[in-house]
């Protein structure tokens, strides 16, 4: 096992799902020697399986439940991770809702709009604030990485709340970077294109029907053909970007929204 992040601790929200982006990020850091905190809405058997796999890579792992839409739980997540490992060096805001797909005129404001914004955007703010306070108190700097989306750069139909939340996450990234740089804390966003995680599979089902494809496979093949690199994204693509942004090599990079899209997004 490499040791590029030996002695460092990373917390990733929404990381308790197998084959998810959060798991992919933690796997990359575990393989580089980092202590890992698996966090999700609940720590169920699947989340425990994610943790067990990370331990198999030689990492020290803690599992902590957190509903990121609750500011008190976000602070508790940071406090518990700090108590477990002595501090937090890297915090990744990955938790998100993208499965509420519906035409703009049919979105239920209270149940659907509010829910997506509360998790995707408010949750990222609550966790950023809690993690930053802990990093400032520790005085060692740190890295905060927001997992945004191609939808942070481009609009998509039937996803008004999701697109709005991800655009907002880029604004949060920029505002946070301006204030936290003085403390040696960088804040950046990563904007992946479509990745077929569990959430991505739900999106495939929905949009293949919406766009008139006979099968999900035909929809994915069309999506791949339109990408300059010839395929959708993988969790490992986003994980590699996180590794770089968390490294010393990227210390002078902050406030950025980095596309990881195989050339599908270029602005």
Image (tube, helix red, strand yellow):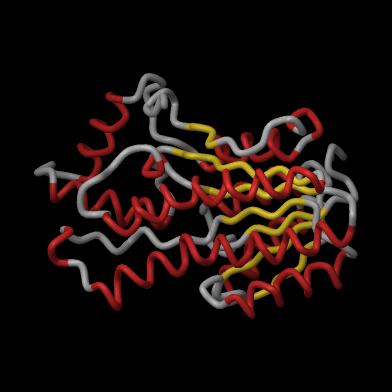
Q: Quadrant of residue 267?
A: top left
Residue drawn at the location 75% of the way across and 54% of the way down: 10
**In front of the other: 32 or 258:** 258
Is residue 44 something that shows in the picture? no
Pinpoint residue 249: horizontal percent, then vertical percent.
78, 28
Pinpoint residue 170: horizontal percent, then vertical percent.
49, 45
Question: Is residue 94 rendered to the left or right of residue 117?
Answer: right
Question: Is residue 110 rendered to the left or right of residue 242?
Answer: left
In what quadrant of the picture does the N terminus appear? top right
Is residue 134 something that shows in the picture? yes
**In front of the other: 90 or 16:** 90
Q: Quadrant of residue 84?
A: bottom right
Residue drawn at the location 22% of the way across and 39% of the way down: 219
How many numbered discs sit on the rendered protein? 0
Residue drawn at the location 73% of the way across and 58% of the way down: 132
Question: Is residue 120 rendered to the left or right of residue 230?
Answer: right
Q: Is residue 189 above or below residue 260?
A: below
Pinpoint residue 148: horizontal percent, then vertical percent.
48, 47
**In front of the other: 123 or 4:** 123
């Amino acid at each position: 096992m490499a040791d590029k992040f030996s002695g460092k601790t990373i917390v990733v929200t929404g990381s308790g799902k197998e084959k998810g982006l959060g798991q992919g990020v933690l796997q990359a850091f575990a393989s580089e020697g980092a202590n890992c905190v698996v966090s999700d809405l609940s720590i169920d058997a699947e989340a425990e399986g994610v943790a067990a796999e990370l331990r198999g890579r030689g990492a020290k792992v803690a599992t902590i439940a957190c509903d990121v839409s609750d500011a008190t739980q976000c602070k508790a997540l940071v406090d518990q991770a700090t108590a477990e490992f002595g501090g937090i060096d890297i915090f990744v805001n990955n938790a998100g809702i993208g499965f509420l797909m519906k035409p703009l005129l049919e979105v239920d404001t209270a149940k659907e709009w509010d829910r997506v914004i509360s998790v995707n955007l408010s949750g990222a703010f609550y966790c950023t604030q809690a993690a930053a306070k802990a990093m400032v108190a520790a005085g060692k700097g740190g890295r905060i990485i927001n997992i945004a989306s191609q939808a942070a750069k481009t609009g998509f139909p039937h996803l008004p709340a999701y697109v709005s939340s991800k655009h907002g996450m880029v604004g949060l990234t920029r505002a946070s970077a301006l204030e936290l740089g003085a403390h040696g804390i960088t804040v950046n966003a990563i904007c992946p294109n479509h990745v077929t995680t569990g959430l991505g599979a739900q999106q495939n089902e929905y949009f293949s029907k919406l766009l008139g494809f006979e099968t999900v496979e035909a929809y994915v093949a069309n999506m791949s053909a339109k990408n300059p690199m010839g395929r959708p994204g993988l969790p490992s693509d986003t994980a590699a970007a996180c590794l770089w942004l968390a490294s010393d090599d990227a210390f002078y990079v902050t406030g950025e929204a980095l596309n990881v899209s195989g050339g599908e997004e270029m602005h």
